[in-house]
Amino acid sequence: MLRRLFLAGLPLTAQSAKAAVRVEPPAPFPGSPILFAVGAKPREAKWMERPVWFAMDESSKEWVALAAVPLDAKPGMHVLDLDGTAHRVRVVPHAYRTGRLTVPPRFVQPPKSVEKRIAGEREVKKAAFAVRSERMWRGAFGAPTDTPQTSPFGTRRVYNGKTRSVHQGLDFRAVVGTTVRATNTGRVAIAQEMYYEGGLVVLDHGEGLFSLYMHLSGFAVQVGDVVPKGQDVGESGSSGRVTGPHLHFAVQWQGLYMEPATLLTLRI
Ligand SMILES: [Zn+2]
């Protein structure tokens, strides 16, 4: 109630006033997405030293920006800088699990013959993720399938008892051929078969926000296509480094992977 009175009682041009900021989720954690909503558009904004851009959300009439908390961020107070005014946001601790997986040995120690291929694919991804387009996403993010979520984001994984990595996405149960849909509007940045990812579609939603759909068995889009939220991007499969058929769904913001389950619940 206080926040509403505060906003209503001030002209939006008042530069000296510290504007109210709505933060979602209310308790952001290392690896979580973080949404900021304000009543007036800041000229310049930074979250943990990274630039963020606010755009008007027509349904809520708020200026909205989406960012991420780095997975290695320390819990505690972090700064959202709006035109030189520091807004402190508390990041709370979060417990991620550890799991062991067994995959074909060629995905833990790739044969020499595919080293060149892997290096080439790394460059394709690097170039795609370096693009900074205008915002294309609008409103809430939708689940890529209607099937249940299985393996969560952030799990520390040990492959075949050796290779350690962090699960940078969210898995959905999906028999081969399940329709996979765009979580939000974007432009297709990658649609190709990759060594580790298998059939991979990457959508560029603008401002350094990308969604990734992995292990696909078929593509419904091509690079350059503009895909509205909810449209098919392909069919799920079991290609690449997998233990079985499923959809791996990941979201990256300015090089940081975020926890998709929370992104899907944000009120935008
Ligand atoms: Zn996965």
Image (cartoon, rainbow, N blue to C red):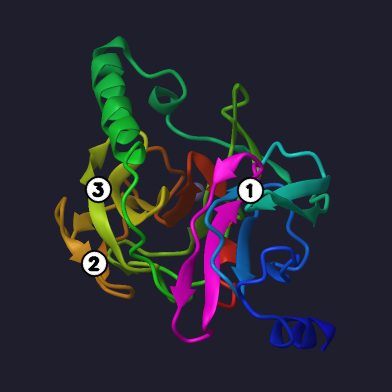
Q: What residue does disc 1 label?
A: 47
Q: Is residue 141 visible?
A: no
Q: Amino acid at mark 3?
A: Ala
Q: Is mark 3 within 8 Å of ligand 1?
A: no
Q: CA distance from mark 1 to mark 2?
A: 28 Å
The residue positioned 23% from the left and 41% from the top of the image is: 193
Residue that mark 3 sits on: 189
Res. 164 image quadrant: top right
Q: Which residue occupies the foreground of this view, 43 or 22?
A: 43
In the rendered image, residue 49, in percent from the top left (x then y), is placed at 62, 39
Write the start and end of the magenta stretch as one range: 47-70
**Residue under label 2:** 227
Q: Earlier in the sequence, mark 1 or mark 3?
A: 1
Judge: label 1 CB < 8 Å from ligand 1. no
Q: State whether residue 191 is above or below residue 236.
A: above
Give left or right: position of 22 versus 221.
right
Q: How far across and down, in percent of the image, does residue 39 sit? A: 61, 75
Q: Residue at x 31, y 61 (%)?
A: 176
Lower sequence index among marks 3 and 2 = 3
- Left or right: 198 as drawn, with respect to 44: left
